[in-house]
Image: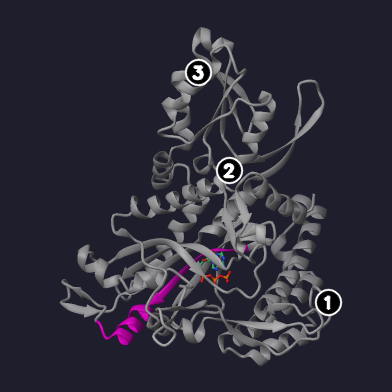
Amino acid sequence: MAKEDIFKNLIAHCKEYGFIFQSSEIYDGLGAVYDYGQNGVELKNNIKKYWWDSMILLHENVVGLDSAIFMHPKTWKASGHLDAFNDPLIDNKDSKKRYRADMLIEEYLEKLEGKISKEVNKAAKKFGDSFDEKMFRETNPRVKANQEKIDVLTKRFADAMNNTNLEDLKQIILDYEIACPVSGTRNWTDVRQFNLMFATEMGSTADGATKIYLRPETAQGIFVNYINVQKTGRMKLPFGIAQIGKAFRNEIVARQFIFRMREFEQMEMQYFIKPGTEEEWFDHWKKIRMKWHRALDLGKDNYRFHDHDKLAHYAAAATDIEFRFPFGFREVEGIHSRTNFDLGQHQEFSGKKLQYFDPETNKSFVPYVVETSLGLDRIFLQIISAAYCEEEVKKDDGSVDSRVVFKLPPVLAPVKLAVLPLVKKDGLPEISRKIMDDLKFEFNCRYEEKDSIGRRYRRQDAIGTPFCITVDHQTKEDNTVTIRYRDSMKQERVKIEKLREIMVDKVDMSRFLRKLATGSDAKD
Ligand code: ATP
């Protein structure tokens, strides 16, 4: 099945099984705003816990914060968001559709990359083991021509973005004959800047009201609390402040489900360091964050770093961790070396000292910052798109059946264990309830007695429950149950008292974190 069709099926699946609903659906929905249903919220909370515990429990010098969404309006002047948090927009006059000019160009570059990959794959198949990819890329005329085109365009595009040269952005679109995907025409308006912040008013009277903004990132809440946390926590450099919270951006084009939303959640950590150590810490956090992602085991070839060609004016270095979504490699997390720009700006605009006194040198300075910034909804999408499988299953009688299974990392699964009495009588429900009552304090368990066992298994597969146990008549005799594993569908009989041990090994967060910390299961 084509990747686009699978992605459509995934979206439908998320609705059908209570993971994600369109916001205000009964009123025909609100663009790029989504609600998380009964299973979605569990998965989301588990992802948050994985991130939070890995930051706070595994790093003695990282502490948490929960700052308000509303902030003093001067915050956004100081941070540069009021003046520069813009995206370049362009309209197609025929389709009346609006696009981000930079994205049109990026998609064009991706198409050229796609052409090269096609040639390379074709040749790899043809030449088999003797294929030398490097040599092929350097000598094949079609590949060389496309690579040259990419290099020239990438440089021109980066220059136009860095210099906010809107005329040249438009000219690139015209020169490379980039057409509107809807109308197919090249009848474009000029490129204009569009500020992504949502504004509202605070205060009861029209005269006295102040214009304020919904925060477009959580980071600024951390910066303005730097001195509070540093002083009250007696923190020594280097130290970090981590926060999970909502952010809002009036995105021009919101597409690809929860990939780009107007209301979303971020998990950010700002690491305050001594000037001069930024390179070392940038590399350090790149490694830590990639290891965290890879521990989820969503396919070793699905990750890559992408260094920014266009650096924000304050940034010393920036890289994205990208994941291979069904629609290509895309950013999930940004790691940015931000110098002392943010604290410096807030110090200037507030008139308050935001410095650190170093007892070793007896000097005060504004700390530098390396940040890690992960989109919670984006990693949610990454996990479900890697986990979604439509499989053919051979039945005992030789016929073929199909199943949809969410192969979620067990530690993140919304429901860890389903307890299923074979029949609704003969004392089996009572034994099942007793098992639930023993395990429910540690694991999210679900009890189901309706429908055949096969159908109940399928429902649990569809929400990603890693373990189903069936209580049958033999249970009454020898205290054993059947445990069925989601991915392999294998079944085995185990003693009831063994269940907890089996569960802990696979789904316990602290055990998972221990593996992450010791590196025994996480690949660098
Ligand atoms: P993009 O280039 O995709 O717009 P960005 O570079 O502006 O993203 P950052 O400002 O670095 O993103 O935000 C950090 C993280 O927040 C991103 O890596 C992403 O995971 C998440 N994020 C940003 N914008 C959105 C959005 N509109 N919807 C969902 N997640 C988002």
Q: Which mark is residue 408?
A: 2
* Label of residue 430 in the image: 3
For disc 1, the marked residue is: 183
Q: Mark 2 is on which residue type?
A: Leu
Q: Which mark is in front, 2 or 1?
A: 1
**Residue drawn at x 84%, y 81% as measured from the top left:** 185
Disc 3 residue type (three-letter): Glu
Q: Kindly identify the residue that appears in the image at 46 percent across and 58 percent down.
A: 289
The correct choice, above or below, for 375 with respect to 386 in the image is below
Neighbours of disc 2 within 10 Å: few (<14), some (14-19), many (20+): many
Mark closest to the chain's N terminus, 2 or 3: 2
- Whether disc 2's CB lies below 8 Å from ligand 1 is answered no
Quadrant of the rendered structure where residue 498 is?
A: top left
Q: CA distance from mark 1 to mark 3?
A: 63 Å
Residue 340 magenta-highlighted: yes
Chain part drawn in magenta: 330-352
